[in-house]
Image: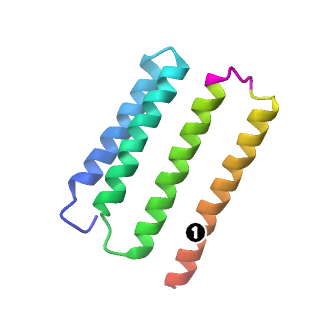
């Protein structure tokens, strides 16, 4: 982290620890998913505002990662809210979209890795 946003890394680590502890403490999966979506949305907003990297490529990769993770979190909330068992068409459709999101994130990563060299 190359700007005066050095606290961003600390906030990032604390949010991840909070989310991990949250998953073990709360029994209701829908509440966990909702809180994770809210917390990750705040993290996404802070990251978009802070833009902690000087390098544009790192900004794009970080933004892509945060966006993909937030979308996956929303998908988990949708699946758990509908009572999906993971085998219905909604779960298969969202699973396919998750794979597309991961493919896009990896493609962006590979593009910027190859572009830098």
Answer few, some or many: residues within 10 Å of disc 1's Cα (few below 14, many 20 plus, some between 14 and 19): some
What segment is highlighted magenta in the picture?
A: 81-85
- Point out residue 18 in the picture as x, y percentages from the top left corner: 36, 32
Describe the element under mark 1 as helix, strand or loop.
Answer: helix
Numbered-mark total: 1
- Magenta segment main secondary structure: loop
Res 87 quadrant in image: top right
Pointer 1 residue = 108
- Point out residue 88 in the picture as x, y percentages from the top left corner: 81, 29
- Point out residue 106 in the picture as x, y percentages from the top left corner: 61, 63
Q: In which quarter of the image is the N terminus?
A: bottom left
The stretch drawn in magenta includes residue 84: yes
- Point out residue 10 in the picture as x, y percentages from the top left corner: 26, 47
Measured along the vertical axis of the image, is residue 9 above or below residue 28?
A: below
Measured along the vertical axis of the image, is residue 54 above or below residue 86?
A: below
Measured along the vertical axis of the image, is residue 66 above or below residue 56?
A: above
Q: Going 27% across and 53% down the picture, which residue do you hit?
A: 8
Q: Going 21% across and 52% down the picture, which residue do you hit?
A: 7
Does 33 sit left or right of 22 as displayed?
right
Q: Which colour scheme is used?
A: rainbow
Q: Going 64% across and 55% down the picture, which residue do you hit?
A: 102
Q: Going 43% across and 29% down the picture, which residue do you hit?
A: 35
Measured along the vertical axis of the image, is residue 55 above or below residue 72?
A: below
Q: Which of 42 and 102 is in front in this view?
A: 42
């Amino acid at each position: 982290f190359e700007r005066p946003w050095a606290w961003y890394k600390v906030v990032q680590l604390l949010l991840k620890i909070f989310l991990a502890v949250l998953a073990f403490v709360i029994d209701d999966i829908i509440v966990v998913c909702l809180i994770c979506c809210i917390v990750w949305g705040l993290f996404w907003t802070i990251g978009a505002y802070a833009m902690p990297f000087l390098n544009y490529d790192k900004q794009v990769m970080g933004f892509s990662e945060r966006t993909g993770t937030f979308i996956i979190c929303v998908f988990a909330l949708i699946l758990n809210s509908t009572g999906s068992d993971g085998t219905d068409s909604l779960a298969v459709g969202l699973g396919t979209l998750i794979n597309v999101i991961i493919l896009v994130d990896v493609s962006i990563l590979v593009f910027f890795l190859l572009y830098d060299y």
